[in-house]
Image (cartoon, rainbow, N blue to C red):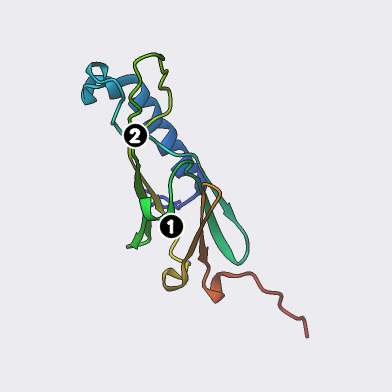
Amino acid sequence: MQRGIMRWSPANDLLRERVNRLFEQAFGDVYSGAESEEVSSRSWTPAVDIAETDEALTLYAELPGLAKDDVEITLEDNVLTVKGERKFEREETKENYHRIERAYGTFHRSFHLPSNVRSDQVEASFKDGVLRVEIPKQEEAKPRKIAIS
């Protein structure tokens, strides 16, 4: 077994994101100064699923309330990054009390991809608040049947 080389797996990214979320929940307000603001403008973390087939990896990100122009996707050195911002639209009223529980602000998610993907053929679509990014695998990475002669 080789040491020092960690293979990509969805579990590694999931664990990293959960630890980041726990840290942000525990210490985020202390560092962002959010307790003095009516609405927190610190980062929020959208939920992401990554599925794998023989042909591709597909990322699904829940981005309710955003438009496709609010999201930026980059792929560099086999790292797929999705970032954007959900802006708070202030509603001024004097008679009603409004409770604000949804998170606003910027988000930034990065995922290390395996080396067997075709980074030149990535496709993204956005529908009903869900971002879908499909990353095809290289032909040699796809399983194939070998005939026995």
Depicted 47 relative to depicted 76: above or below = above
- Residue in the image at 37% along x and 23% along y: 25
What residue type is disc 1 on? Leu
Q: Quadrant of residue 145?
A: bottom right
Mark 2 → mark 1, Cα distance in angstroms: 32 Å
Q: Secondary structure at mark 1?
A: loop
Question: In the rendered image, which residue does mark 1 sit on?
Answer: 113
**Image x and y of residue 70, in percent:** 37, 50
Q: Quadrant of residue 13?
A: top left
- Front residue of 29 and 114: 29
Q: Secondary structure at mark 2?
A: loop
- Residue in the image at 43% along x and 57% along y: 113
Classify the position of the C terminus by image quarter. Answer: bottom right
- Residue in the image at 21% along x and 21% along y: 33
- Front residue of 70 and 31: 70
What residue type is disc 2 on? Phe
Q: Is residue 81 visible?
A: no
Depicted 20 relative to depicted 115: above or below = above
**Image x and y of residue 15, in percent:** 45, 36
Question: In the rendered image, which residue does mark 2 sit on?
Answer: 88
- Front residue of 20 and 142: 20
**Image x and y of residue 101, in percent:** 43, 23
The answer to whether residue 21 is left or right of residue 39 is right
Question: Nearer the N terminus, badge 2 or badge 1?
Answer: 2
- Pick out the residue farthest to the bottom: 149
